[in-house]
Amino acid sequence: NNRIYHHEYVLMSRRTHPEPVELELTIPAFEPLPPQYFLRVMSVAWVGCEMLLPVSFQHLLLPDRQMPYTDLIDLTPLPTSALHEPKFEQLYSKFETFNPIQTQLFHVLYHTDAPVLLGAPTGSGKTIVAEIALLRMKKRYPKGKCVYIAPLKSLARERLKEWRKRLASPPLNWKVLELSGDTRHDTRSMNQADVLVCTPEKWDLITRGWRGTSADNDLNPANNKKKFIDLVRLLVIDEIHLLGEERGAVLEAIVSRTRFIARFVKEEMRRKAQSKDALGANELLADEGSTGQHELTRIVGLSTALANPYDLGDWMGIDTKGHGVAAKRGLYNFRPSVRPIPMEVHIQGFPGREYCPRMATMNKPCYAAINEHSPNQPVIIFVASRRQTRLTALDLISYAAGDENPRAFLGCSDDYVESVASTINDQSLRHTLTFGIGLHHAGISSHDRETVETMFLNGDIQVLVATATLAWGVNLPAHLVIVKGTEFFDGKTMRYVDYPVTDVLQMMGRAGRPQFDTRGIACVMVQEGKKNFYKKFLYEPFPVESCLGERLCDNINAEIAIGTINAVSEVVGYLGWTFFARRVKMNPSYYGATSDSDEDVDDFFLSVTKDTLTKLKDNGCVNYSQDDGQLGDEFAVTSTVLGMAASNFYLQYQTPMQMRKGCREVRKMIYQLLEGLDQKEAHNTTSDAHKTSTIKKLVFKTYTPPPEVETAAVSHLLHALSETHEFDEVPVRHNEEQLNEALSETLPWGARPPRVSGLDEGYVGRHFRKSDHSDIMLDPHTKCYLLLQAHIVKAKLPISDYINDTKTIMDQVPRLLAAMQYIALDDASTAGVFDLISYFARLRQVLSTRTMVNDNPFNQIPRFPRDGGRKLRNRGISSLRDLCSLPVSESAKALDLVFGNGNRVKHISNRATQFLNSLPLVTVENVTTKHEIEKSSGRASGRLNFDIMFNTRETANARRGGHGMDSKDSLQAESNLIIIVGTYQSRCLLCHKSVTISGGKVNKKSQSIEMSFDWALANANGGPDGGSMVMRLLHEDIRGMDSELIIPLQIGG
């Protein structure tokens, strides 16, 4: 009929060329289905540049028209006393009865162990549903653990804050821990926890170590089996409908692995119960009568109303296909109308193709909506960007001023709001707050954010303009919610894309305040062409589709690395556990399957498996067992070092190959630079020690590498790190290329590492052509490299967005550096690796102390004067270690020389002394070496034994900043020491170990260390005088305290 169902203008940019631009179109489908639609693409600049593509509907399966909703039964509200446990009842002392949804689910939650999927609108009390399941689990398994998965870190913190108040206080006194990218806990604290609040990625990483690994590496986070994972008896996944979004693949991995672990642990317990050492495992068999066929770990999923709850329920372990009494038990999918507070929704369309002008036309209707629907009650306006929060607030102020009431939105006195505004850091927020309008986004400080939230809750300000993340992170309901635009700028595709419908529903869900409103109002402002779409699909959502296909390589690699998958056929079997498999059967054309027949689906899975394993092999993550490189069903699949690195350090599967290439280039550069230096200069720190022949004469020397080599190594390692796929999505916003260029001119290394004279152009530090300059400044990896340098030198950043970008990058750096080092260790026997690993430690020092390579380490001392280093060198003190090695009286005299000894500078000198006394002085004693022949392999193995001594002249209190010492000038209570041993010649790595130096009351501690090494490699590269090894002791968080020692191969052995 030649009707146009969709039209869209697409801009192709040079920056993204030749990458394809992916579009997602929504078009109507009528029954009977037409055989095909046509898609026409035309250029507006070139005549004859067009194409016509037929889109076949031959295998399209439409979802059921009837939504599988659960009816809300009219039951008498259940009193909280139904818990029959006074400790539990105290949690709900603020109300007497559960709400209708909680009442209807109570029996399944509290009296069975069946998995539960609850689809209900926002504000239905789903958190209490999760708590009831938690109470059941703790009543049944007192030592069991609950894992709560929150989709965002902000939501995890909100849940942690609430549960620590209620669950971690008397009478329950349960231990609640948060596990996210910002937190670190040791295995002991996690073993003691009752409730773990996690982000999906963090729990995915943790569960990858449930089996443990035999890898002998201190850096490997999966090195020890995490026993507490076996004790998880309840997994709660909040907002499980996000399965259909980009991060949904992680949720699929979590649930599939959880069910696998639960069955494995149950079988282990059954075997133990049948053996003599049954000790407590009989509890499982005794309880099987009451648990029925339910798995050991109960899964509870919380969601909004779903279009395909049966698929999700079946994947979680709910019986959705049976017809008995227990069929569909635990599956609840309530209509949006069961919301405790009814909501009135208004959808308004606005013309205009360009985003910013269209947003500007929405401001006056926003003001009108406030006056009409909520003139005196709280209002939240959701916008897509931080810039829009400011522009929207300023327009609202001008409209209110036009009505001669500029402070119409202010709910407190002018004096009070002025006093509060004076404490605000953000200039725009300080201005808007005085007119009763708050701004809320990730670019403002935590103090500003908390102030705005408190004022909004107290009614001091009426309007809050926020970015969409507020809808998920903070529970701030309002009477009126305005969704100003349903698009946001996607930095990855460099264009505006629509919010998922679930996000729009989450924003609308903030409308209506329990105990205050009888109804909530939501205004959704959209582009004119999308008005009908939102009218239909706001309450008739699309089926949740799987995103596992996009992350399948990462997930399959992880399962191979941990040993769940060992053959090609097992990959296909693993896919059968996933939500992906269920949706391929229901919607084959969406995933690329030919049809929904069993034969076509099996062929599709086999094709996907082979494609996935081929990609993993091409990136060095897996190996096949056969010679011809062809895959068959029963061929074995094994993980490689790169595959283990991707799994253990949570990397994209392409990243380890990039890291290996970067490490090898830097290693080659370091080796050539050191070889090119004068032999005497290159080893001047160790020549005196090498002359000794007995352990009693061994003398520590401060390890100070050549400055030009260290600068080259650190700058190129940082660059190699920033070039990895992990930073592909660092946002480069509009016009930020100009800010990047200006920033690069103020930083020591600029946009690329300094060129190393005398070396090939092929290194990572290659220069770029001027014609490429603008494109390079648009590159997210360039921005990452610039922000890393800015962090080190404490440079002033041009805008607040850069502060948040830097924090996001720095959160990832420790994990990525550990991964790079883990990969570099695979080349341990290669020349130059010994120095490469040394420079990893030196790079950590630079990042930790935020001092450049060429900065004087004495500058770490608080308030150290500029000429202080010269004064100390005149006294023969050339390093921080030399200063710490002096007796207390001598070091005090040296500091007096630097700071002076007058009363005015006495407190500065005292702070410097306290800092100096807190530094751990590390020495080595009782060194012996021996070698033996291993009977199994015939290989000569060496043993290095020694005692390491930690000496400090103050307690940990000083290290934490006690005795008047500023905490920012103090060391952490715990610090890491890296011990590496290498060959005297060729600089091969023999062995390494990480040691934690912990604070305490004892000023002198010792630890016995044993390290194994390849005796043949050490002997072959031992040099003259019977052969020697080089030991380096490198601190990770302080510069100037590193030391080096030459150890003869024949000591005490």
Image (cartoon, rainbow, N blue to C red):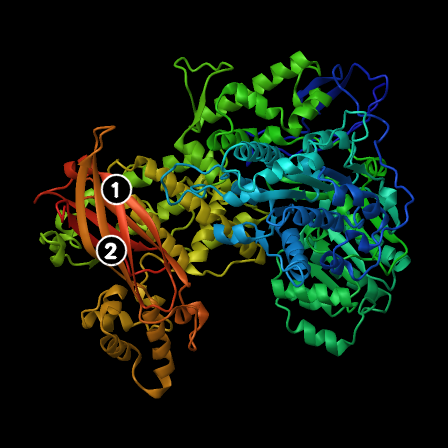
Are circles 1 and 2 on residues that touch, CB within 8 Å?
A: no
Give the spatial CA distance, label 1 vs label 2.
15 Å
Give the residue displayed 88% in from the left and 58% down from the top: 517
Q: How many marks?
A: 2
**877 left or right of 606?**
left
Q: Residue furthest bottom?
A: 903
Can you tell which quarter of the image residue 232 is in?
top right
**135 left or right of 463?**
left
- Which of the pair 71/804 is nearer the observer? 71
Number of other residues with Cα within 10 Å of mark 1, as a class: few under 14, some 14 to 19, many 20 or more? some
Q: Position of residue 885 (x, y in %)?
A: 23, 68
Q: Position of residue 426 (x, y in %)?
A: 63, 65
Q: Could you say whether the residue bearing mark 2 is in a helix, strand or loop?
A: strand
Q: Position of residue 390 (x, y in %)?
A: 70, 58
Depicted 369 relative to depicted 943: above or below: below
Q: Is residue 753 visible?
A: no
**457 left or right of 754?**
right
Q: Which residue is mark 2?
A: 947
Give the residue displayed 66% in from the left and 18% down from the top: 593
Give the residue displayed 73% in from the left and 76% down from the top: 416
Q: Which residue is mark 1?
A: 1012
Task: Please name the amino acid that badge 2 sits on.
Answer: Asp
